[in-house]
Amino acid sequence: MKQAQQMQERVKKLQEEAAGKSVEASSGGGMVTVVANGRQEVLSIKIDASVVDPKDIEMLQDLVTAAVNEALRKSQELMKDEMAKLTAGMGLPPGLI
C-alpha cells in the first residue's frame, strides 16, 4: 500500500514537471509551428504570413490542424517515455499507468 502511495506521488510530480517540458511540431515546411507541453496543452502557434491567403483559408486550416495534431502526438510520446522511466524496474506491464 505504501508503495502505491509513493507511486501516486511520483506520478503527480511527473505530471507537474510535464507542464515545464515542451515539444514543437510544424507543417507546410515550417510555415505553421505549434508548441505544446507535456500536459497536451498548446502553448503557442506561429503562422508564417506567406500562408495567410484569404482565398485559400482551407489550406491554412489544414496546416494548423496537422501541426497541432503532431505536437499533441509528440506530447503524448513525451509522457509515455517519462512514465516508462518512472516505472522501469518495477515489473509493471507496459501501459499500466
Image: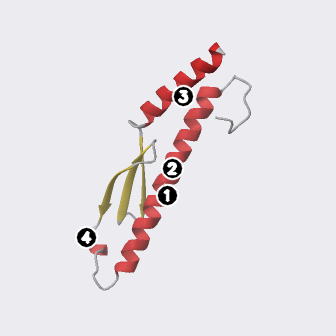
- Residue 56 at what x, y percent from top left? 34, 83
Mark 2 to mark 1 CA distance (whole Å): 6 Å
Which label's residue is closer to the chain start, 2 or 3? 3
Q: Is 93 drawn above or below residue 40 in the view shown?
A: above
**As drawn, is 83 to the left or to the right of 50?**
right
Which mark lies nearer to you, 4 or 1? Answer: 1
Q: Which residue is mark 3?
A: 11
- Looking at numbered disc 1 in the image, what kind of residue is underneath it? Glu
- Looking at numbered disc 3 in the image, what kind of residue is underneath it? Val
Dot 4 falls on a residue whose secondary structure is helix
- Residue 48 at what x, y percent from top left? 28, 67
Assess whether mark 1 and mark 2 are in contact (beta carbons under 8 angstroms): yes
Mark 4 to mark 3 CA distance (whole Å): 41 Å
Which mark lies nearer to you, 4 or 3? Answer: 3
Which label's residue is closer to the chain start, 1 or 3? 3
Mark 4 to mark 1 CA distance (whole Å): 21 Å
Q: Which residue is mark 2?
A: 74
**As drawn, is 45 to the left or to the right of 97?**
left
Dot 1 falls on a residue whose secondary structure is helix
- Looking at numbered disc 4 in the image, what kind of residue is underneath it? Ala
Which label's residue is closer to the chain start, 4 or 3? 3
Q: Residue 28, can we see it? A: no
- Looking at numbered disc 2 in the image, what kind of residue is underneath it? Lys
Assess whether mark 1 and mark 4 are in contact (beta carbons under 8 angstroms): no
Front-lying residue, 18 or 4: 4
- Residue 45 at what x, y percent from top left? 33, 58
Q: Which residue is mark 1?
A: 70
Image quadrant containing the C terminus: top right
Assess whether mark 2 and mark 4 are in contact (beta carbons under 8 angstroms): no
Which label's residue is closer to the chain start, 4 or 1? 4
**Other residues around mark 2 within 10 Å, as few (<14) / some (14–19) / many (≥20):** many
Q: Which of the 4 quarters of the picture holds residue 28?
A: bottom left
